[in-house]
Image (cartoon, helix red, strand yellow):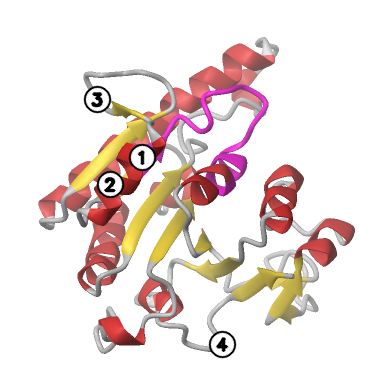
Amino acid sequence: MVVTGAKSQDLAYRRVLLKISGEALMGEQNYGIDVDVAHSLAEELKVVHRLGVQVAVVVGGGNIFRGVSKSAGNMDRSSADYIGMLATVMNAVVLQDALEKVSVDTRVMSAIEIPQLAEPFIRRRAVRHLEKGRVVIFAAGTGNPYFTTDSAAALRALEIKADIILKATKVDGVYTADPMKDAAAERFNEITYRQVLEKELKVMDASAISLCMDNNLPIIVFNMREPGNITRVVSGESGVGTKVAC
């Protein structure tokens, strides 16, 4: 059930960047896109959008292709990363379609120029779309090889002056170890950027965490599979996920 009790005046964050992995769009499949998952995510974002939150999204491409993966084989790293960027564009268009089917005005902006599918990323235009109440989906990462979509999320969030990064995962926060493999793993309610780096916790890659730390941009890591969690996070509800900050 989606939480709908929050009011616009209760919002803890007015402009957010949601980072979701490509794998999240697979659902229970082993590969590709589960359109039902995309639709469920669109419904969640619709609720948040109607509260008056300005929403930007960075989506990964790991459900189709990752530059650093077995599927890349012995390909040149730059070439493999560019293919991964194209995979994020595919996911972005799927999510755009799902959002527009629930009547949410959406724009895809790509770091690689593909005018038939997406607008080129221009910072001021992206901010203007948000101000006009459109959900903006950033595709193709940073447009450069050797940078992950985590780094793209941190970069885009800073460029649009987002209040926070919402890192959507399949677990309910940051743990001392992988809770899927270690039953004794303990969850943090809050943790600092430096602790994440020192403990080598797999929140986001080190360059993304460092960029957020240098610019004091907070991150909340939460379980996107729990219906209503995005609304709970933007409403500032305590106990949802783990906050990464100074």
Return the disc, 2 or 4, that comes first in the chain's sequence: 2
Q: Which residue is mark 4?
A: 239
- Is residue 147 magenta-colored? yes
Task: Using a 10 Å C-alpha cutoff, classify the residue at mark 2 as few (fewer than 14 neighbours), some (14 to 19) or many (20 or more).
Answer: few
**Residue 4 vertical placement versus 71 (above, below):** below
**Viewer-nearest of labels 4 and 1?**
1
Contact flag, marks 2 and 1 (Cβ < 8 Å): yes
- Is residue 88 magenta-colored? no
Return the disc, 3 or 4, that comes first in the chain's sequence: 3
Q: Which residue occupies the foreground of this view, 131 or 186?
A: 131
The percent coordinates of residue 14 (x first, y second) are 38, 69
Amino acid under disc 1: Arg
Return the disc, 3 or 2, that comes first in the chain's sequence: 3
Q: Which mark is residue 128?
A: 2
How far is the residue under mark 1 from the one under mark 3?
A: 20 Å
**Residue 12 vertical placement versus 71 (above, below):** below
Contact flag, marks 3 and 2 (Cβ < 8 Å): no
Q: Which residue is mark 3?
A: 117
What kind of element bears circle 4? loop
Judged from this view, the residue extending furthest toward the front is 124
